[in-house]
Image (cartoon, grey):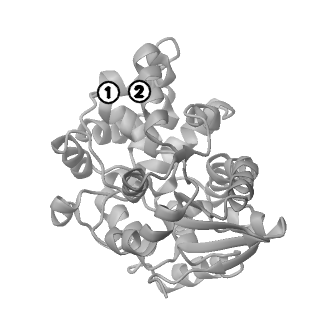
């Protein structure tokens, strides 16, 4: 169970942890594309929200300022054979880069595992009121059933922290079974980029500390955590469908639609009011992405400027949702004087 928890925690920093599974079992876990089935009015409203978002579409970008150059790869944290095209495209860049920057490298994942072994209260609250008392009967019934399907009994679920449960609900039972079958190994794009860099002798460095996850959620009020959990319940019951939906949006490059689809679906299925959904969506965006993007800007640009003195670029692979938006990395870099250009999916 520990490797499953560590794996989920390590991945949950990205919204794309809703997407899913080892290629060997892709068909077994595959669901419906819910975005394709949206009513026309909902689709139009979602597209209108996306229309004015900076850098809303695209996975691969270059930022340049003088001699400093950053190649940015928007990643997807689970396996798919289509990653091979990305690896082939950027393998030469990684081999020549001064450093590969990622959200969490092997050292950070090892530190997280050690911390969880030493302090179970990081993800569980043994002293607070159980969730079965904090949630209403209907929500508790849905949550306990969903977590039982993911191999966690109600007696354990009752004491886990709501933010952790909300992240785990995005993972389908099918995906978790395949992860267990693979003994916890993963071949999502982030890990494949890391493997490629290590093989080429390119240094790999994390852009943030291993314990970032806990600080991300530390400032949330108890009721906000519960709302986050309630908003995640619909996806738990159709996790394979969510996985397919977000996977297809990712590979089509419709990055910000990933985010706005979650809002659209929550309007219809979460049981929260539209105002509550909007509040939770904005809170999640600030906590999971905006704050971290601002924190990443200085080390990212400093690494590029240092590399420029060696006549090299840096490659950065982060969850794709960190790239677009007013507080996305691309817009922050542009505001800092960097010239942003999209990169082709094949080398020219």
Q: Residues within 10 Å of mark 2 (few under 14, many from 20)?
A: some
Mark 2 sits on what residue? 113
Identify the secondary structure beneath mark 2. helix
* Residue in the foreground of this view, choosing between 235 and 269: 235
Which numbered mark, 2 or 1, is in the foreground of this view? 2
Using residue 306 as the reference point, say whether residue 239 is left or right of it: left
Give the residue drawn at x 39%, y 33%.
6
Give the residue drawn at x 17%, y 66%.
27
Using residue 48 as the reference point, say whether residue 28 is left or right of it: left
> In the rendering, at what x and y percent does residue 231 appear?
51, 50
Label whose residue precedes the other's in the sequence (2 or 1): 1
Using residue 2 as the reference point, say whether residue 219 is left or right of it: right
Mark 1 sits on what residue? 2
* Residue in the foreground of this view, choosing between 334 and 142: 334
Q: Are marks 2 and 1 in contact (CB under 8 Å)?
A: yes
Give the residue drawn at x 31%, y 21%.
155
> In the rendering, at what x and y percent does residue 108 appear?
49, 34
Q: Is residue 136 visible?
A: no
Q: CA distance from mark 2 to mark 1?
A: 8 Å
Outermost residue to the top: 127
Quadrant in the picture for residue 154 = top left
Q: Which mark is residue 299?
A: none
> In the rendering, at what x and y percent does residue 148 appear?
25, 36
Residue 93 versus residue 193 in the image, above or below: below
The quadrant the N terminus occupies is: top left
Identify the secondary structure beneath mark 1. helix
* Residue in the foreground of this view, choosing between 243 and 297: 297
Q: Is residue 292 visible?
A: yes
Give the residue drawn at x 26%, y 67%.
31
Quadrant in the picture for residue 66 = bottom right
> In the rendering, at what x and y percent does residue 23 appear?
22, 62
């Amino acid at each position: 169970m520990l490797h499953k928890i560590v794996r989920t925690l390590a991945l949950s920093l990205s919204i794309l942890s809703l997407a899913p599974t080892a290629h060997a079992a892709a068909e077994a876990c595959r669901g419906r594309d819910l975005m394709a089935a949206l009513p026309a009015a909902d689709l139009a409203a979602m597209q209108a929200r996306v229309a004015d978002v900076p850098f809303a579409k695209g996975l691969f970008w270059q930022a340049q300022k003088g001699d400093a150059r950053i190649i940015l790869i928007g990643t997807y944290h689970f396996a798919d054979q289509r990653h091979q095209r990305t690896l082939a495209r950027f393998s030469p860049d990684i081999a020549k880069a001064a450093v590969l920057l990622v959200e969490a490298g092997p050292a950070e994942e090892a530190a997280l595992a050690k911390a969880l072994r030493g302090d179970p209260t990081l993800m569980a609250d043994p002293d607070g009121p159980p969730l079965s008392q904090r949630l209403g009967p209907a929500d508790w019934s849905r949550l306990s059933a969903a977590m039982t399907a993911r191999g966690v009994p109600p007696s354990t679920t009752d004491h886990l922290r709501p933010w952790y449960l909300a992240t785990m609900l995005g993972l389908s039972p099918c995906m978790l079974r395949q992860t267990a079958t693979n003994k916890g190994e993963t071949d999502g794009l982030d890990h494949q980029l890391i493997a490629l860099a290590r093989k080429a002798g390119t240094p790999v460095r994390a852009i943030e500390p291993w314990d970032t996850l806990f600080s991300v959620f530390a400032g949330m009020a108890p009721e906000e955590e519960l709302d986050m959990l309630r908003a995640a319940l619909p996806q738990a019951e159709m996790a394979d469908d969510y996985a397919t939906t977000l996977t297809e949006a990712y590979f089509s490059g419709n990055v910000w639609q990933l985010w706005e689809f979650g809002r659209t679906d929550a309007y219809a299925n979460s049981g929260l009011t539209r105002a509550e959904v909007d509040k939770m969506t904005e809170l999640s965006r600030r906590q999971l992405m905006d704050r971290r993007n601002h924190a990443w800007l200085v080390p990212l640009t400093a690494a590029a400027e240092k590399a420029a003195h060696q006549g090299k670029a840096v490659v950065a692979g982060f969850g794709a949702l960190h790239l677009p938006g007013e507080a996305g990395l691309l817009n922050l870099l542009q505001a800092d004087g960097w010239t942003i250009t999209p990169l082709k999916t094949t080398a020219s």
